[in-house]
Amino acid sequence: MEIPLLCGFAFLAGFIDAIAGGGGLIQMPALFLLMPGLQVKDAVTILGTNKMSSICGTSAALIQYARHIRIPWTSAGPAALAAFLFSFLGALAVSRIPTPILRPLVLALLVLVAVYTFWRKDMGAHHKPRFQGRQALLPAAICGGAIGFYDGFFGPGTGSFLVFIFIGLFGFDFLTASASAKVINAATNLSALLFFAASGRIYYAAALPMGLCNVLGALAGAKLAILRGNRFVRPMFLLVVTAMILRYGWEVLAR
């Protein structure tokens, strides 16, 4: 019974993540709740299983976006490369550093993201890149490295943080930011997945069917975002960020 339920959550996670990021908000709690019933109690294996499922949906969404949206590779490419390298370091550190110490920091960052996005009504409405050509290399590498380490180490909220960075720092609109975020997400997921796979920390009996459902959800979400445009993606982004604030706020206050 656990695997069909996990597949349902994976579909929903892929759908939401393809639009505005934040799929981990749905998939991760489901894994921690249901995986012990499958006799998997190792938290690192749960994280590895999540990465296996997530990379399937992220890759599908990226392909869907790339067919319809012009992805700024001069920014997304260097960020993805740096994210790939630092995500592996994050995955390596996850077994040595207690992740709960990150929750208050993540909560504070999410609140700032939400306040800024609500305040800037025109944020992400127009595509006006601030960096051209080689100007994007350094900021892209720095942002990619930082978010890559976080994704390999902890994960949830990575897509939403990426969307915010591409809009706030790089000047992209919401749709282009969502498409670009998938490039980095795919790189970080692959990097962390290589570590988890090499260390035998993936429960394939759940990860493979979840990955298929995540793909189906991601394709549906990306298609809807492309059809509806920025006016649809922005409220979805705010909804996801608000939900993450409530989740992490509860976890921090409940400690």
Image (tube, rainbow, N blue to C red):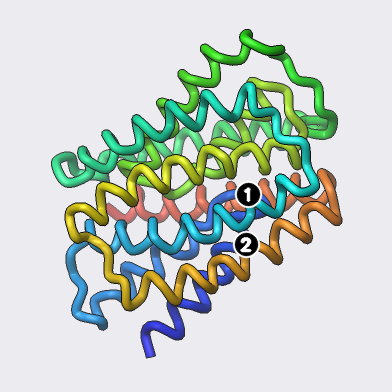
Residue 127: percent from left, percent from top: 81, 28
Which residue is nearer to you in this view: 106 or 124?
124
User: Position of 231 compared to 245: left or right?
Assistant: right
Q: Give the image location of residue 116, x and y in percent.
A: 66, 30
Q: Can you give x and y, in whole percent of width and height, for residue 100 in the image?
A: 26, 46
* Residue 179 to residue 30: above or below: above
Check the image and report above or below for 61 versus 109: below
Instruction: Indicate the amino acid at tag 2.
Output: Ala
Residue drawn 62% across and 70% down?
Answer: 216
Image quadrant in which you'd find residue 33: bottom left
At 51% across and 48% down in the image, what residue appears?
245
Q: Amino acid at mark 1?
A: Leu
- Looking at the figure, which quarter contains the N terminus? bottom left
- How far apart are labels 2 and 1 at the CA level? 9 Å
122, above or below 27, in the image: above
Between 160 and 127, the one lying in front of the other is: 127
Q: Earlier in the sequence, mark 2 or mark 1?
A: 1
Left or right: 248, with 9 as reference point: left
Q: Which mark is residue 216?
A: none
Q: Residue at x 25, y 47 (%)?
A: 195
In the picture as drawn, the residue positioned furthest to the left comes out as 96
Nearest-to-viewer mark from 2 and 1: 1
Disc 2 to disc 1: CB gap under 8 Å: no
Task: Give the residue at mark 2.
Answer: 218
Where does label 1 land, which residue?
62
For label 1, the crowd category at 10 Å Cα-Cα, with few meaning under 14, some 14 to 19 and many 20 or more, is: many
Q: Quadrant of residue 228?
A: bottom right
> At numbered mark 1, what does the secondary structure look like: helix, strand or loop?
helix
Q: Is residue 169 left or right of residue 105?
A: right
The crowding category of the residue bearing disc 2, from other C-alpha atoms within 10 Å (few below 14, some 14 to 19, many at least 20), is many
Expressed as whole percent of the image width and height from the top left, the position of residue 113 reads: 59, 34
What residue is drawn where x is 49% and y is 23%? 143
